[in-house]
């Protein structure tokens, strides 16, 4: 008989406030461990690069919030956002990265990385405990749509070199890498649930892998069908007993 402690976990979390070298090693080692279990080490490089970019993106988003807070700029006001984004790009060098790494820790901004996996595929969620500003979300979706048209990150960069803060390059890289690997770029999803920003990347191992979004939708439909089936007898009984 197998003890529960001997069973391999189906999901594992890695917690961090910023993207430092130690975290890079933890992410890489975790991916290597998961992919080796299912003989999918051929996906290690692309998986690591994509997840690394998502974590860097989340970390920069937290630094940007810290910068806006200390300069008394409203990140949801377009004029302030435009001014702050330009200034933030100018300050984002190696020295200031370390400074803002400490600031986001003090502000309790966190990034959690969750790995959910089985023999059919891997789902990685990078969860930032701050919501994405509406202005950034609109721009991000435009940049993701634009990246779908490219097969080369260098071509994308040349066409978007004037991007206000260089945002979107990491996400574009993910889209292009997935496309070139033959993985549907729709497996990358980014959105907010009110308090958090969640970037979800799925790497299928098999052709019959069901995307998380479709699986949750199917579960919702099945639950609604069950609710209808349960409530139907009451509705029928009530109608039958009504006098006309």
Image (cartoon, rainbow, N blue to C red):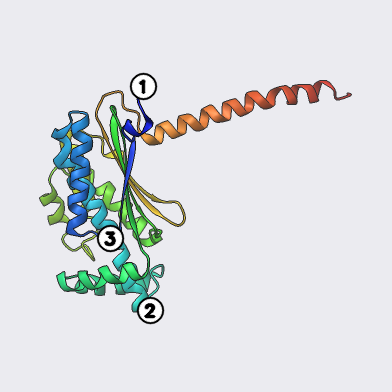
Find residue 1 and name its label: 1
What residue would you read off at disc 2? 72
Q: Nearer the viewer, mark 3 or mark 2?
A: 3
Q: Which of 62 and 214 is in front in this view?
A: 62
How busy is the neighbourhood of tag 2: few (under 14 within 10 Å), some, or many (20 plus)? few
Q: Which of marks 3 and 2 is nearer the N terminus?
A: 3
- Image x and y of residue 172, in percent: 21, 49
Residue at disc 3, secondary structure: helix
How busy is the neighbourhood of tag 3: few (under 14 within 10 Å), some, or many (20 plus)? many
Q: Are marks 2 and 1 in contact (CB under 8 Å)?
A: no
**How much space separates mark 3 and mark 2, taking CA atoms?**
20 Å
- Image x and y of residue 125, in percent: 33, 45
Where is 56 relative to 4, above or below?
below
What residue would you read off at disc 3? 59
Where is 179 relative to 128, above or below?
above
- Image x and y of residue 139, in percent: 32, 57
Q: Nearer the viewer, residue 195 or 189?
A: 195
Which picture quadrant has residue 136? bottom left
Q: Which residue lies furthest to the left in this view?
A: 154
Q: Which of marks 1 and 3 is nearer the N terminus?
A: 1
The residue lying at 59 percent from left, 26 percent from top is 226
Q: Which of marks 1 and 3 is in front?
A: 1
Q: Which of 124 and 85 is in front in this view?
A: 124
Q: Residue furthest right?
A: 243
């Amino acid at each position: 008989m197998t003890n529960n402690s001997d069973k391999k976990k189906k999901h594992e979390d890695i917690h961090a406030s910023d993207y430092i070298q130690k975290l890079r090693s933890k992410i890489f080692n975790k991916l290597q461990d998961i992919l080796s279990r299912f003989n999918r080490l051929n996906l290690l490089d692309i998986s690591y690069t994509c997840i690394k970019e998502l974590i860097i993106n989340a970390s920069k988003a937290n630094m940007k919030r810290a910068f806006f807070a200390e300069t008394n700029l409203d990140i949801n006001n377009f004029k302030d956002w435009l001014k702050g984004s330009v200034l933030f790009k100018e300050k984002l060098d190696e020295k200031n990265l370390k400074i803002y790494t400490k600031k986001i820790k003090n502000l309790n901004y966190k990034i959690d990385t969750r790995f959910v996996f089985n023999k059919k595929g891997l789902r990685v969620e990078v969860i930032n405990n701050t919501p994405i500003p509406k202005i950034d979300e609109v721009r991000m979706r435009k940049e993701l749509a634009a990246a779908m048209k490219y097969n080369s990150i260098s071509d994308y960069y040349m066409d978007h070199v004037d991007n206000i803060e260089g945002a979107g390059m990491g996400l574009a890289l993910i889209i292009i890498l997935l496309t070139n690997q033959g993985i549907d770029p729709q497996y990358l999803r980014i959105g907010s649930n009110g308090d958090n920003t969640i970037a979800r990347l799925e790497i299928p191992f098999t052709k019959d892998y069901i995307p998380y979004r479709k699986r949750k939708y199917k579960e919702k439909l099945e639950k609604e069908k069950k609710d209808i089936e349960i409530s139907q007898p009451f509705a029928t009984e009530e109608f039958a007993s009504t006098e006309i």
